[in-house]
Amino acid sequence: MMPFDLVEPGTLREALALLDPEDSAVRAFAGGTALMLMMKSGFFRPKRLVSLNALAGDVASLSLSPTGELRIGAMVRLAELERAPEIRRAAPVIAAALRRHSNPRVRNVATVGGNLAHGDPHMDLPPVLIALGAEVEIEGPAGRRRLPVDGLVSGYYETVLRGDELIVAAIVPPQPRRRALYVKCTTRAADDWPALGLALSLEADGAAIRAATIVLGAATERPMRLAQAESLLAGRTADAALIGEAGRVAAAEAAAAIIADARGSSAYKRRLLEVELRRALARLLDLPAAGETR
Amino acid sequence: MSAAPRTIRFTLNGRTVAAEVAPQESLVTMLRDRFALYGARESCGQGLCGCCTVLVDGRAVSSCLALAALVDGRAVTTIEHLDADGTLDPVQQAFIEAGAFQCGFCTPGFVLMTRQLLEQHPDPGDDDIRHYLAGNLCRCGAYPEIVQAVKLAAAKRRGAAG
Ligand SMILES: Cc1cc2nc3c(=O)[nH]c(=O)nc-3n(C[C@@H](O)[C@@H](O)[C@H](O)COP(=O)(O)OP(=O)(O)OC[C@H]3O[C@@H](n4cnc5c(N)ncnc54)[C@H](O)[C@@H]3O)c2cc1C
Ligand code: FES
Ligand code: FES
């Protein structure tokens, strides 16, 4: 790797001051697990790295409010998140999703902020957090702002973060009567990037669905809400026919956005989506997985 | 700090040390080149294989993905420290007894990861072991013996505790 300037400020304010909105070679360095790969391959040549590892307080801690709102500091390590009792109580789907994230060494250092800011569509947390209706808190020279996680990633490796802004926290609202699930579909080695990530969250009484949030990751340029499938399900009582229909509607609405790569053709990923959504709904709603053919 | 080499101070295997490192130097390079600690070695260089595993403040990390300069003020432990008191760690002993290696290239990483595994799951089942060690690769394919070694180590540790 080429030499670069490395700074490790002790406060968020100093960290923000060391960023440069005009220069994309000046970057925040959190766990570094994504950046080191890009730097070692020569794909990213930093001029200055601003390490966030000396930051303490809010930005590095996790809390659950009495109302059930989770606040996850950007520098919370994925391993901490996976094991936190607050997460297991308030949003167990996050802990379950992390079990299939990388390996325990990477999770020991990789951060929530890095997972959200990286903008790689294969990241596991963005679809999960979108399905839970989470927001990100962002701080910049003009102060703090909040954004739905759904509005953060704007394209392939692109986010709406400005060069002089940092993610401070992710905020997950209370999830009363909600059940959520994340499905990570790998088609080659188990720890390869997924062909498809699918996060869903349902508000339901038995099989009576009040609302559904369905998010497709990995197969598209950025995480994608499947609004047609969501509205098909809302207000209906689920049965085998309905969840089969939801799979087909989802595959059709995502068709144009799905990208073919080494992990599967676009037709294959559409079929994966159809089948995996149906199965996931069956699991969440305790229905037999209808329409299984082999 | 800047692009120039800087002096860092940290605890290495229980001793306070200092080193002059460049900002782009990785932790595994520093350990090998400055401290002649060859137990951690860079193989995949991408966080996938575990051959470069060391502990930073007690947590297992891939030293191929860590910047040396950022261990300033922290505590680094390498495989070389496990027998510091003259006896092998129970996990090392278990790997020997189970014959859980052939060339030994991957072994330091497996041993360090197994210790962390046993801290979190004192009595792991086959699935726990396979899942936890999925980020460690053994090109000699000693996996069946490694799983045996982990169970043996778990039993030794429980025996020692009880
Ligand atoms: C072996 C391996 C396996 C992996 N497997 C998976 C996997 O299964 N699933 C998955 O999702 N990912 C995986 N990853 C990617 C992993 O790097 C990310 O998931 C991780 O969360 C990134 O976090 P980080 O703290 O290391 O980010 P860094 O590398 O430090 O940063 C990544 C990007 O985010 C920016 N950034 C970091 N923090 C902030 C902040 N607070 N505000 C603004 N910008 C910020 C950085 O500037 C940089 O652009 C894997 C990586 C490796 C090495
Ligand atoms: S060399 Fe670091 S994990 Fe493979
Ligand atoms: S013993 Fe040779 S790589 Fe594992």
Image (cartoon, coloured by chain):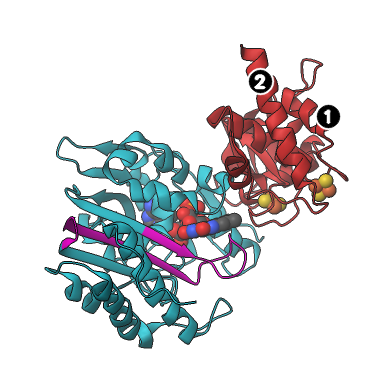
Chain colours: A cyan, B red
As drawn, the residue found furthest toward the top would be B162
What is the distance, in whole Å, between disc 1 and disc 2 at their CAs? 15 Å
In this rendering, does residue A159 appear at all? no
Magenta extent: A182-208
Q: Which mark is residue B157?
A: 2
Observer-nearest residue: A186 or B48? A186
Give the amino acid type for the residue marked by disc 1 in the picture: Glu
Observer-nearest residue: A217 or A204? A204
Same subunit, labels 1 and 2: the answer reads yes
Q: Which residue is mark 1?
A: B97
In the visual, does A54 lie left or right of B145?
left
Q: Earlier in the sequence, mark 1 or mark 2?
A: 1
Structural crowding at the residue carrying mark 1, measured as other residues with C-alpha within 10 Å and reported as few (<14), some (14–19) or many (≥20): some
Residue A223 percent location from the top left of the image: 35, 70
The question of residue A195 being in magenta is answered with: yes
Q: Residue at x 57, y 27 (%)?
A: B122
Are the two marked residues, 1 and 2, in contact with CB atoms closer than 8 angstroms? no
Give the mark count: 2
Q: Mark 1 — on which chain does it sit?
A: B
The question of residue B47 being in magenta is answered with: no
Residue A267 percent location from the top left of the image: 46, 86
| Looking at the image, residue B91 lies above or below residue A69 | above
Give the amino acid type for the residue marked by disc 2 in the picture: Arg
Q: Quadrant of residue B89?
A: top right
